[in-house]
Image (cartoon, grey):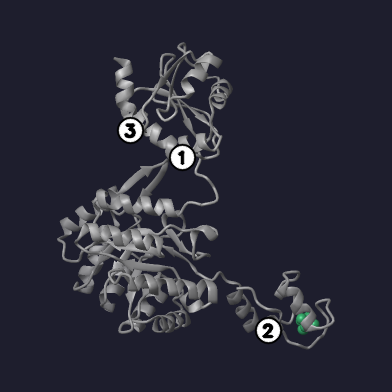
Amino acid sequence: MALTGMAIYKMLPRTNCGDCGFPTCMAFAMQVASKQKALTDCPFLSEDAKSEAADASAPPMKLVHLGPAGDAGIDIGQETVMFRHEERFHRAPALAVRIAAGLSDDDAQAKLTEINDAVFTRIGQEISVRLAAVEIGGMSADDAAARVKALAEKSRTPFVIIGEDAAAMEAAVKAVADNKPLIYKATEQNADAFIKIAADAKCPLAVSAESLEKLADLTKAAKDKGADDLLLAFDGHKMPQTVRTITSARRAALRKGVRALGYPAVVDVSCENTMKETVLAGTFAAKYAGVIIMNNADPAELLPVLTTIQNIYTDPQVPNTVEAKLYEVGNVTEDSPVLFTTNFSLTYFSVEGEVERSKVPCYICVVETEGLGVLNAYAGDKLSPEKVVQALDEQKVADKVKHRKLIIPGLLPAFKAEIEATSEWKEVLIGPENASGIPVFLADKRN
Ligand code: SF4
């Protein structure tokens, strides 16, 4: 939050010495408030004032790094708005799948394999489970350390370690110290011990309390004791109460500058009912989790949640587009079919995916439509037979194939006559209305 001139003035020595080039401290403070000068341009600033100024200029929500340093870890937090349309949401929540403490070592490894395998490609982007949530509740310190160590050797992802016993947590965290796991979670009962473990190991820590006031007290205590990479932990099963609470915490941080609540959230939605778990995870992807802990690693459950996250965390002011150019799918030849589509990512990757599935190598001519899909582009005057012919010419498609057949989207049958009449593409075939019909369409045309 920006500091006022008066707040800045109170940090200054107020001696009016003039060494900063201004006749009074107040004049200098007003320059700092209007961002014409930096506070540090006063050479007599106390260390306390520097620290206070750094705190005041920090983002309202802390950026927290989970896992090893660099790209092997995950950044969450530092969000800036309540609503996506105000700007955008910045850091997509990480899904964490729980490996239950009660599993045998073999079953725990099998669950880890499911987590490792939970990587998918959608509209050209990789989406995946990004954390393994290893539960150590009820384990001795030695067993907890052995469990996390064995899993860490084969894990694709960083860890959340879930437990309540301080001795077991300390041993588990030490066993995978380089992994910098998220410690889940400090409560009002175990706070002192868990904060110490997090501060000593320099690991992120989730904290929970029964009210936002107590949660703020806990984060202040943790910060004072050297643990400042914090997440606010919420119980995802208490809907809609948790949505209200998590929203209040975010509003307090972003709109009212309450620093003690300026941390990303972790929400546990784990339950055996997969349908319920999916709905809860999707809800908290929108409002406002940084980490979501789930039980199940079934792709049928994960994909709806990951798709929801992917959609919410795009920039609403920037259309998702691919470059308008000629794409080759498979080992194309001069006999390969030619299709056209628009440069809206979802449209293009749907077409590309179905062409791949057909196993028929094709050329795809992508027409610039400012990121609109077929019908929207047509309705918005961004797509016309002339634009298609122009794109075919500019991309020199006729040089690539010896035929002059063009497959057009089934939603635009009216384009056929005009393209045939005004270009060298004299055989325009009306393709399927949906991309899912492409494999059958191409197979029919080949036979
Ligand atoms: S140098 Fe510092 S103390 Fe001196 S007038 Fe400027 S702001 Fe005030």
289 left or right of 133 in image: right
Quarter of the figure with residue 37: bottom right
Q: Residue 388, position in %: x, y?
A: 53, 25
Q: Amino acid at mark 2?
A: Met
Looking at the picture, tell me which residue is in the foreground, 20 or 276. Answer: 276
- CA gap, disc 3 to disc 2? 65 Å
Which structural element holds mark 3? helix
Q: Quadrant of ligand 1?
A: bottom right
- CA gap, disc 2 to disc 1? 51 Å
Quarter of the figure with residue 5: bottom right
Residue that carries the numbered disc 2 in the rendered image:
11
Residue under the image location 54 percent in, 71 percent down: 60
Residue under the image location 19 percent in, 66 percent down: 101
Residue that carries the numbered disc 3 in the rendered image:
436
Which structural element holds mark 2? helix
* Image quarter (top left, top right, bottom left or bottom right) of the C terminus: top left
Q: Residues within 10 Å of mark 1 (few under 14, many from 20)?
A: some
Q: Amino acid at mark 1?
A: Ser
Q: Residue 127, position in %: x, y?
A: 37, 48
Residue that carries the numbered disc 1 in the rendered image:
345
Looking at the picture, tell me which residue is in the foreground, 228 or 419. Answer: 419
Q: Who comes first in sequence, dot 1 or dot 3?
A: 1
User: Is the Cβ of the residue at disc 2 closer than 8 Å to that at disc 1?
Assistant: no
